[in-house]
Image (cartoon, helix red, strand yellow):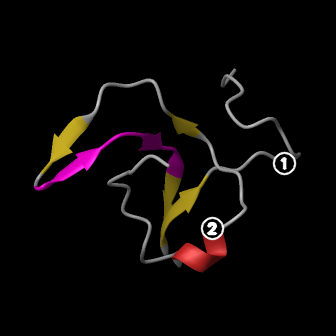
Amino acid sequence: MKKSSAQITDVYKPEELEGKQILAVVNFPEKQIANFLSQVLVLGTYSEQGVVLIQPTEKVKNGDKLG
C-alpha cells in the first residue's frame, strides 16, 4: 500500500475508504512534503466541505491507466 499526503481527513475516515476505488497517479516520483514522504498523487476536487475524491462510476481493474 502506498502513502499519500492528500488532505482528505476532514471529509473521509479510513474505514469509509476501505474497499473503495479512487483515481490516483502512482508512477510519479516520491515527494517529501514536510516530514512525510508522499508516494502517490490522489485525485480530487475542492468543495466547501473539503477535498472530494474522484471515483470511477463503474468497477474497473485496479491499476488501469487513466484516460
Relative image position of residue 43 (x, y in whole percent):
52, 44
Residue at the spot x=39%, y=51% of the render? Answer: 3
Total label count? Answer: 2
**On the picture, is 56 further left or further right than 7?**
right
**On the picture, is 21 further left or further right than 58?**
left
**Label ID, residue 23:** none
Residue 12 visible in the shown view: no
Q: Amino acid at mark 1?
A: Thr
**Circle 2 is placed at which residue position?**
17
Relative image position of residue 35 (x, y in whole percent):
11, 56
Residue at the spot x=45%, y=24% of the render? Answer: 27
Find out whether the residues at labels 1 and 2 contact each other: C-beta distance under 8 Å.
Answer: no
Is residue 54 shown above or below 17? above
Q: Which residues are magenta?
A: 35-44
Q: Amino acid at mark 2?
A: Leu
Q: Is residue 41 magenta?
A: yes
Is residue 18 shown above or below 28? below
Q: Nearer the viewer, residue 26 or 53?
A: 26
Quarter occupied by residue 59: top right
**Label ID, residue 57:** 1
Q: Is residue 25 magenta?
A: no
- Earlier in the chain: of badge 1 and badge 2, it is 2
Q: Secondary structure at mark 2?
A: helix
